[in-house]
Amino acid sequence: MSTKSTLNVIAAYDKVCAEKAELAQKGSNFAADRNAVARQIRKLHPKRLTLTVGEIIRETPTACSLRLLSDDGSPLPPFQAGQYINLFLTVDGVETARPFAISSAPQSRDYYDVTVRSVPGGFVSPYMVGEMFEGQILQSSGPMGSFYYNPLFHGGIWFSWPAGPVLRRQ
């Protein structure tokens, strides 16, 4: 099956092709849509998020996962496994920020989980594990980082192994 015949089964493909041809011939003024596009980009890649600690899940005596929810109940920006957020905190009157890997599944946009282990002698992690509370409001960055597996870029296949997923190069 050719690519063209494959694409014809996609709803409205012919209409989009006709619109593309018309734009190529006449040109386009995207100024009217500029703000709409910028708004959509800001939704998907915000610089700052206001999050609420919805639940504190005790993993061990020295580690917990914080379930962070959007303050307004809207879906959180999408992320890929391996990305992180910076949390902006005030600890003992000192404003600071720390990066935390998002440990929840990327398929859910209802919350981000970040798992924290209290580091002996640490400044932020003991506070997060021992003093944070449900309902606490936090500021964070949007999801960041490019340390994730992308099958289109990295190639190879994933297969399930009892100890977890393994990448096998082809």
Image (cartoon, helix red, strand yellow):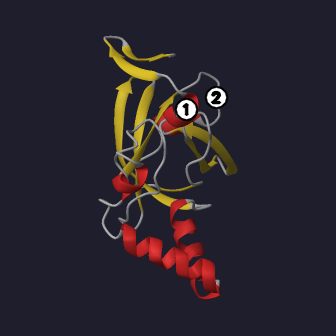
Report the residue at 41% width, 56% height from top: 4
Quadrant (top left/top right/bottom left/bottom right) for the N terminus: top left
The answer to the question of whether label 2 and label 1 lie on touching residues, with beta carbons closer than 8 A, is yes
Query: Marks 2/1: CA distance?
Result: 6 Å
Q: Quadrant of residue 142?
A: bottom right
Q: Quadrant of residue 28?
A: bottom right
Compared with 143, 82 (above or below) is above
Report the residue at 51% width, 61% height from top: 44
Counting from the top left corner in percent of width and height, residue 25 is at 62, 82
Side of 56 where 100 appears, left or right: right
Q: Quadrant of residue 42?
A: bottom right
Counting from the top left corner in percent of width and height, residue 156 is at 49, 22
Residue sitting nearer the eye, 163 or 110: 163
Compared with 130, 140 (above or below) is below
Residue wearing tag 1:
126
Secondary structure of the residue carrying tag 2 is loop
Badge 1: residue crowd in 10 Å (few <14, some 14–19, many ≥20): some
Report the residue at 35% width, 55% height from top: 5
Counting from the top left corner in percent of width and height, residue 73 is at 35, 65
Q: Which mark is residue 122?
A: 2
Side of 9 where 89 appears, left or right: right
Looking at the rendered structure, the kind of residue marked 1 is Pro
Residue 14 visible: yes
Residue sitting nearer the eye, 146 or 124: 146
Side of 60 where 31 appears, left or right: right
